[in-house]
Structures are given as C-alpha cells and as structure tokens.
Image (cartoon, coloured by chain):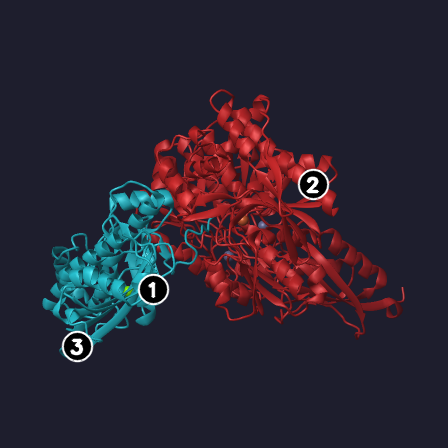
Chain colours: A cyan, B red
Amino acid sequence: MKIDMAYGSGGKQTSNLINDIFLKNFDNAVLAKMEDSAVLKVNGKIAYTTDSFVVTPIFFRGGDIGKVAVCGTVNDLLMMGAIPKYLTAGFIIEEGADMETIDQIAQSMSQAAREAKVKIVAGDTKVIEGKGGVYINTSGIGEIKTNGISISNCRKGDVILLSGNLGEHHAAIMSHRMGIENTIQSDCAPLRSMVKNLLDNNIKVHCMRDVTRGGLATVLNEVSKSSSCGVEIYEDSLPVSVQVRGFCDILGLDPLYMANEGKMIAVIPKSQAKKALAIMQKSRYGSNAAIIGKIVEGSGVIMTTALKGSRIIDILYGEGLPRIC
Amino acid sequence: MDKEQNVITKRIKVFGMIQGVGFRPLVFRLAEKYEIHGTVRNIGGIVEIIAQAAEDNLSSFLYDLRSNSGDEYEIVHILVEEINENILTEFKIIKSSSDHEVSIIPPDLPVCKKCQNEMDAMENRRYQNPFISCTACGPRYTIIEKLPYDRDHTSMEDFVMCQSCNKEYTDAHSRRFHAQTISCYDCGPYAIMNELKDKDAVKEAVNILNSGGILAVKGIGGYHFVCSPMIEETVLNLRKLKGREEKPFAVMFENIKSIEEYCIVSKEEKDILESKARPIVLLYTKGKSMAEATGKGGIYCGAFLPYTPLQILLTRNLGPLIMTSANLSGKPIIKDDDIILNLKSPYLNGVLYHKRRIVRSVDDSVAKVIDHKPQLIRRSRGYVPYPVFLPKWNKENTDLEIFAAGSDLKAAFCLYKKGSAVVSQYFGDLEELSVLEEYKSSFRDLSSLLQITPDLAICDLHPNYHSAGYAKNLGIPLITVQHHHAHIASVMAEFDLEGPVIGVAFDGTGYGSDGNIWGGEFLICEKSEFKRVAHLQYTPMLGGDTSMADAKKTATCFLLKAGLLPEIQDDRVPIIKGAVENNINTVLSSSMGRLFDAVSSILSICHENRYEGECAAMLEKEAVLALRKGIKPEKVTFALKENNGIIEIDPKPTLKTLCELRNSADKGSLALGFHYGVADVILMVCELIRNKQSVNTVALSGGVFQNTVLSERVLKLLREKGFLVYVNMAVPPNDGCISLGQTYIGLRKNG
Ligand SMILES: [Fe+3]
Ligand SMILES: [Mg+2]
Ligand SMILES: [Zn+2]
Ligand SMILES: [Zn+2]
C-alpha cells in the first residue's frame, strides 16, 4: 500500500499510520500514552542532540535509513560520555512511499534502539509531495556518566585509537548506487557497549568522536583545531578491509575521507593506550580497533606515509579532484 | 692632448649577471688600460662606475665592457649619464653599498678552463685541488648568505684565508683578485672521507666506487648518491637506498668524448652540456650500454659533465658515474652534513664531503634539445636565481613587488621587482610535507636575499593546491590565475608578447575555470585576459591522484566515452563503468596528457606512470624508433565539432584506429601516427582559429610539449603554414613555468 497526502492530514489515516507502524514497533509505555509531550525522568547532567538523516538508497547492505537515524544520534550522545536514554523521531515521508517500507524502517529503528538501550518516546510524521522518499530526524537525551570529555581536551602525547575499519558505509552506499555486487557492508552500529566498557574500566578518555561524514580526515582536523594541537597519524596503521581497499583503489577514493556510521576515535593518555585498545578490541564492533596516531605539538594533521614520506591531511574540498599533472 | 679640456665624467650603471664573476676587477683593469680615474662599486645587484677620462677613452672603455659580455659575465643593460665631478686622481674599487635596487645574484658556476689547467699542472700549488676556483668560477647562489657578495657574507667565511691566498685576493692583476671562494690546500675546505683528507679521501672514494660501492658525495646544491652505472646489483641497491625510485638515473661523464660512446650528441647538445649551467641533458642512447637498472629501458640517457673539481677528479678516475640527487622517496635533496652522516642504510658505503656549508639546496637542472634549441625540463642549479627580464614593465610598474606561487608539482615560485622576475629553484611535489617546508623557507630566504617584500600574491585556481593555500595566508592582495592561462602567459612573458596569441596548452592536469580538469586547451590570450576557444572533448574520469597515474584505467574511461568498450581487457571495467555512469567520484577531463597515457596503454606499451610522464615517454620511444627505422606512420585522425562556439576535439576516430590495428599493425607506426595525428589536429585547430580571429601567432606550452617527436612535428607544420610560433626557452614548458606566467598576468592586471 502506498502512502498518499491523506496520511499527513492528521485524520484517521494519520492515526492508522501511527498505530500500525510506530506504536507497534517502538512499543514503550511513554510513547503509548500519546500525550503532547513525553515526560521523562533523568539523573544529573544530560547530553542532548539532534540530527536529520537523508540517505539514498534507503536500504543498503548492512543497514537502512532507520538504523542510521538511531545509531547516529545514539553515537553522538555517547561521544560526550553520556549514556543514551531517550530518542524522538520525526518522519518526513514523500507521497508514493510504500507503507511496507516505512514499517521496515521502523522495525529496524526499534531493533537498533533495543541494542542501544534507548526508548523512542516521541515522534511526528508529515507527508509531502514527492517521489516516495523518506527523511528522518532524531533527537536524543543521554545521562552524562563522565564529565570533561571534549574535542578541545586533547593533550600533547595522547594516543589516538580508531575503533575499526574505515570507509565501509560509504563504500556500501556507493556500490549500491553503481549497481555493483560485492560483499561490502555498511558499518552502521550503535557504539554503546564500546564506550561503556571504556568508561567502566576507568579509561581517562580526553576526547571521543564518531567518524561520520567527511571521514577520519575531517574529524582529526576538528581535533587539531579545537584542541590547538597537531595530529600525527601513520598510514600503515589505518585499518581498511581488503574489499574496501580494492574498491577505493579502482575508484580513486581515499578511505580517509569516506563516511562511516559505526566508527569512533578515542583520544586517551599514552599510559592507558594498550589497555584501552584491548578493551576496544574486545567490545562489539571493535575487533579491528587500532592505535593510529598521536597528539603532537603544532597544528594540522600530518600523515606519515607507508613510504616514510609525510603529507598534510586537509579537509576535503571537491571530491576526487586530482592535483597531479 | 689638452687633458683639462677633454676630460669628462660619466656615471655608468650596469645591469646583468655581473655579481660574483669578477666584474669589478675587470672594470679595474679596463680602467687602467684606458687611463680612467674614478670608482666602481656594487649597489644591490647593480654595478655603478664613475669614470673620468678623455671622451675617446671612455668610449673605448664602454665598448670593451659591452663586447666582453657573454663570456664571463652578461650585461643586460647599461645606463650612462654625464655628471659634474671634480678632477679625480686614481681608479679604485670602493665598498659595496646595499640599497634597494634589484639584486642580481649569480648562479653557481662550473670550474673554468684556467682553473682546470691549474688543477692539471703538477707544479701548481692547487694541483688536483678539489675546491679550486677563481673570479670566473665556483659556487655562488648556494653559498651566499646575504648581499653584497663578499666573502664574509658567504659560507666561505668559515675558512680563514692563508697568506698566499690573501696575496692573490688583494692583487688586482691576479685571477683571484676579490675571488670570494678562493681556497687552497692550506686554508681549506678539505675533502673528507672517514679519517682521510684531500688526496687520500678522494683515493679512498675511488676505491669504494671501483669495487661497486655507493657513496654520498657533496656537490654544489646538495649531496649526490654516486655509483657505477655499469653494475646491475649496485644500481639496484641505489634504487633501494632512494626508496622505490623508478626514474632513469642521470650519469656524469668525464668529457664529451666519453658521452659519445653511449649517446648521440648533436652540436646543440654539446653546447648545452658545456654551458655554464652544466645541466643534465637528455640524449638518445646508442652503442655501449649500461646496467639495465640505470636507464630503465628508456631511449634517453640523462648525461652531464662535471662542474666541481671533485667531480672532475672522480670521473677522470672512474669513467661514467651515476650522480643522482641524494634524497629519499619524494623528499628534498639533502644538503647538510649531519643528516647524510647519520643516514643509516646498508646500501650507503661512505660519505665524501667537505665543510663548506651549502646555504641553500639546489637540484641539478635538466634540459633537452628540441628543434635545435635547448629546452629546460627542470630549471635549477646554474640558472637560478638569474632573472627573466620583463623589460616592458621595468619603468611602468616601478613599485609593484610580486610573489607568484606557481604550481604544486614541479613547484617553483617567482619573485618580481623592477622588471626582473626571479624564478626560484625547483622544489618537486608540494604534497610531501618536507618539500612544502622547503618551499616556504625558500620563499623567506629568497625574498630577504633579493629584498623583495611582495605587495601582491598570485596563485593557481586549484582549491587544493598547497602553494595557493600558502599564497592566500600571506595576507596581501591575491589574484588567482587559471593554470593553462599561466602556461601561455609564461611564453608571452619570455618573448615580451602582448597578444593576441593562440595559446596551445597541453599538459596533464590543471584546474579549469569551469571547475573541470583541463589539459588540452586552445586559448586566445591577450594582455591579462584569455578566452578558451577549443579543447579536447571532455571525458569522465575517475578522480584522485592515483587514478591519474593509472593509464589502463584512463584508457578504459576514454574507450567508454567513445563507445569502444569491448576492446578493453580489464576486470575493473564493471566498476569503472558503474562509477562513470553514476557519477561516483568522477571528474570531467580535457587533458591531452591523459590521452597520451591512454594510447600508451591501448598499445600495450606502458600501463602505469610509476614516475611522472612514464607512459608518454615510452610511447614517444616507440615513435622515435619507428622514425629511425623509417617506418611509415599509420594515419590517425581526430574529429572536430563545435559546441557553443567552442571547438571540441573528439579522439574517437583516433581510439578506433588504434584499437582496430593494435594487434595487426606495427606498434611503432601506430605510436608515430598518433604523434603526427596530434600535430595535425593542432594545426587544423590553429588554422580554424586564424581564419576566424586573424591571429597568426602561436604559443605552445605544457608538459606534453617536452615530447620531441610531437614538438618538432607541430613546429614544422605550423611554420609551413606561416604561423609565428613561440615556445618556452628560459623556463620549462612544464609546470616549472607557471609562476612566471602568473607574474606576467599579475603585472598586466596592475599595469
Ligand atoms: Fe601544467
Ligand atoms: Mg551526527
Ligand atoms: Zn676558475
Ligand atoms: Zn690558501
């Protein structure tokens, strides 16, 4: 069954959509009350964030827009040392979208929420003219577990850990758009257990950041800027799967600039580097975690290449723009 | 003769390459000869002479000054004015004054004939001295710390002159009168190897090289790695020492005769080999061959002659030697002793050095002969920092001082002041951080040396160029210039052209004004403006620098666009196709360099550029061999169409012919045919433009024109049809010319 403008009218069809899909999938007591607002109980300081999700295609190997919408917001909360508690979800649906598609998205959101131990406690739906697209906004609240984790908190000598292989989400999406059959899957995942394990084991995390759009290069540049420090990474140490490496080589892509949906960096004191790495590697989604670099004097991001050269890693401008003559 | 009545006084200002070449002593001797009283001194880079004598004597004096030019010094310009002056009683050299005139710093000079003779004379006190020099020879640019060029402003200040040297230094009739680099066995510098000194050190070095070892030897602008080019294993070890270097190595020969055993040397090539700059000259190989790992199967040998006394001693004892800049994988040439002495590698068997500091590093220059004229490939030692004079701008823009950032590959910046544009030494690829640091510190160095404080910066349009980023951060007014426009403007700068000219800019990659990748461009250039009138048709290509080096992938992209897919055997085709069709990480390219790559791959000649231009060089090799064998070129053509008033050159017919014939026809005839086809289409397009716009002048620039077969063919065709054709002479046609072109455009815009 296709969704048409009537589903956005606020009338019966709207309430069908809410009951049959959202209430069913997001099943929890707060939402079920259907009040104008969710009334929540939280302890101490909270972290609060929002993000909107636009992904084409909606379904891809390793995930879909719903999973990304939950994981994205959950991970943003986690990066502040907050344990995610509640999410809200707003849907903008273009007419012509399949009811079944929306149901699948909601199911996938519900599953991701369960894994991340968050409740989706409020929501909204609008239907607009279009070609069957779906866009999702999620907001989230998390309880701060550890104070002072900040992108401006990195210190010289700190070590940078990356939680796993680069570029998988981006490569999966691109493969889909090109109609290429391969085994590359999006890395889309909530990083709750990894972050919790680090914090529970008293790792003095100075900074965490999820590595999403713009890739590792962008995140590291943000670190350098906010903490007024230099960042040094080693090309040799960057984890990239064989499949993604091959895919990138053909397309001329650089995994450093590719989007991920379930990867983070953690910047921690050198003394705890080994312990932290072991914790990451034992955590779910962390088996390929690696120490990739360190915080140094100076400014900007410098990579020591496999051939012992060094190059500046800038923020991406103009995808794939070649420089060489 | 009634002296009182005929005596007049003139102030003579001499511009040119007259610093550090014994010019003032020469003026002194000339003054003696013609009984002239007065003074000579350096002011900045100009020499000022006050000359008082009878009018006839003054004329003779000026005549001699001018007519000697070109041998040991080079006068560009002389200004003479008559002044009122009291009667003077002698002629003397007076102390230099540095004020704000344009400084002309001499490039480094090779050992002169006279010094070589002294080296060979057993009774001479500098017999076989590795540092012999005089006013006409020796290092200059690489040892000068600041102007004026006096000994205590150079790294020679570390050596105290002995009494004998001091006597020569102060004797106006000596060849070493005021020779700032004067030295001998007593005062040093000394050749050092391990614990050994001078002759013993050289002997030890000879022994190690003789037994197949690799040495680092200190030169003028930096260290060289040196070894025999004949021993395969040694040369392979050298490649390991340098780290993945794939380029053919340059070889230094004792003399022309020795070169001729291995290479074909024309009259013009001999002249450049022996010129003051002593560049590496790319010569066609013949006869005796060296180890495979030296030349890497190319048809060129980069040959050059010794320019330091130490190199003379080594090549004399050992014959041909690989002499390649001592650097590691893409990093700058090493110039400091402590760095090379601490370089731990199992492949380096020793260091032959001395303690005369190299103040700034400068690589060897590279040149070749095209159309019987020298063409620079890399402009560095021996040429830098000699300016390119832009005479038109000398007066009009007296105050504007410019920094032009150049390009990111083959980076070289340009500093401009009062009609002289100083293009810096070559730095290499700025992607490597240490090269970028070198570029930045050299800007600070050279601008302070030349006393230039730029009030205008110019850079490339490319948003990701490090050079452009640097220029933007200088905090002075900034102009951006399109890459290929700068190519053509560099030719206009060299020949003082105002335009309109038909600029043909063929290279690998440049950022276009429309955001696409250009490189097969026909531009009408006039003054500071350009208009794109024709280009190689756009082909979607995969992005990223690594894709650009992958000729097989490039070929696939071209064939996809031309609808010739079944011709390719590449298991990556589905992904490449998927990317191109879905616009994933693709760019639109009109690059002619890429077409050369593609053709090289289609003909199975070379599939990858392990170093810049490898595929094109190997393609050219096949064409050259075909020419030598008298093989007829296959007919290869392009199609022309017009799109919004712009001519688009479609390579489809070319690709079709090559694909159809590649398994049946002779490879050489196809390679040659392709070169001729490109030349033909240049002519066709130029004629179309001439018919429409009545422009008869053509300027060629861009790395593609380093190709001898193409360049000579296209020059011939264009001249036959009455075109007036200009190509780069003072700077390379590759990106080494960009900063000069940028400077020209900056001046035009502000003129
Ligand atoms: Fe170029
Ligand atoms: Mg986010
Ligand atoms: Zn000499
Ligand atoms: Zn001496």
- Chain bearing tag 2 is B
Q: Are marks 2 and 3 in contact (CB under 8 Å)?
A: no
Q: Of tags 3 and 1, which is closer to the observer?
A: 3
Q: Residue furthest bottom?
A: A44
Instruction: Decide if residue A262 is in sight here.
Output: no
Which numbered circle lies on residue A39?
Answer: 3
- Residue A169 shown left or right of residue B575 in the figure: left
Mark 3 lies within 8 Å of ligand 2 (Cβ measured): no
Residues indicated by labels 1 and 2 sit on the same polypeptide chain: no
**Rendering coords of residue B327 (x, y %):** 40, 49
Q: Residue furthest left?
A: A201
In front here: B420 or B126? Answer: B420
- The CA span between labels 3 and 1 is 39 Å
- Chain bearing tag 3 is A
Q: Amino acid at mark 1?
A: Asn
Judged from the image, the secondary structure of the residue bearing numbered disc 1 is helix
In front here: B149 or B439? Answer: B439
Q: Residues within 10 Å of mark 2 (few under 14, many from 20)?
A: few
Q: Residues within 10 Å of mark 3 (few under 14, many from 20)?
A: few
Judged from the image, the secondary structure of the residue bearing numbered disc 2 is helix
Q: Indicate which disc, 3 or 1, sits on the residue closer to the N terminus.
A: 3
Residues indicated by labels 2 and 3 sit on the same polypeptide chain: no
Which numbered circle lies on residue A221?
Answer: 1
What residue did someone put label 2 on? B688
- Residue A39 shown left or right of residue B735 in the figure: left
In front here: A69 or A127? Answer: A127
Q: Of tags 2 and 3, which is closer to the observer?
A: 3
Q: Of tags 1 and 2, which is closer to the observer?
A: 2
